[in-house]
Image (tube, rainbow, N blue to C red):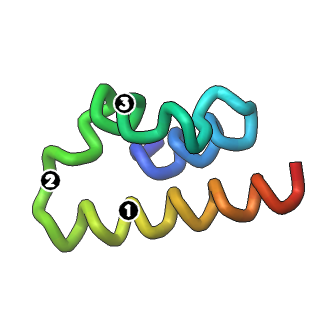
Amino acid sequence: MNKVRIAKNLVKSGALNKNNAAEVLNLMGLFDGPIEETQNNLNEIYACLAANNENP
């Protein structure tokens, strides 16, 4: 299971939210890869966060 999928599951469970996203993603090591890959991953995770906020 990759980090993006784990993060999306954390969003769905409520464990990852807009208030703790930066800290949790940093602890997961999401920022350790190449910049372009990291940006793509963040875009995908934040889109999931936004969708979860619209449909809690």
Residue under label 2, please give it.
33
Q: Earlier in the sequence, mark 2 or mark 3?
A: 3
Q: Amino acid at mark 2?
A: Gly
- Which numbered dot is residue 23? 3
Q: Secondary structure at mark 3?
A: helix
Q: Secondary structure at mark 1?
A: helix
- Which numbered dot is residue 11? none
Assess whether mark 2 and mark 1 are in contact (beta carbons under 8 angstroms): yes
Residue drawn at point x = 41 percent, y = 30 percent: 24
**Residue 28 rendering spot, x and y as whole percentages:** 33, 31
**Residue 11 rendering spot, x and y as whole percentages:** 65, 41
Cα distance between the residues tagged 1 and 2? 10 Å
Q: Secondary structure at mark 2?
A: loop
Instruction: Determine which quarter of the picture holds residue 25.
Output: top left
Q: Earlier in the sequence, mark 1 or mark 2?
A: 2
Q: Earlier in the sequence, mark 1 or mark 3?
A: 3
Q: Amino acid at mark 3?
A: Glu
Q: Nearer the viewer, mark 1 or mark 3?
A: 3
Cα distance between the residues tagged 2 and 3? 16 Å
Q: Amino acid at mark 1?
A: Asn
Residue drawn at point x = 77 percent, y = 54 percent: 53
Nearest the eye: 3 or 19: 19
Cα distance between the residues tagged 1 and 3? 15 Å
Classify residue 30 as left or right of residue 11: left
Instruction: Determine which quarter of the picture holds residue 34.
Output: bottom left
**Residue 27 rendering spot, x and y as whole percentages:** 30, 26
Residue under label 1, please give it.
41
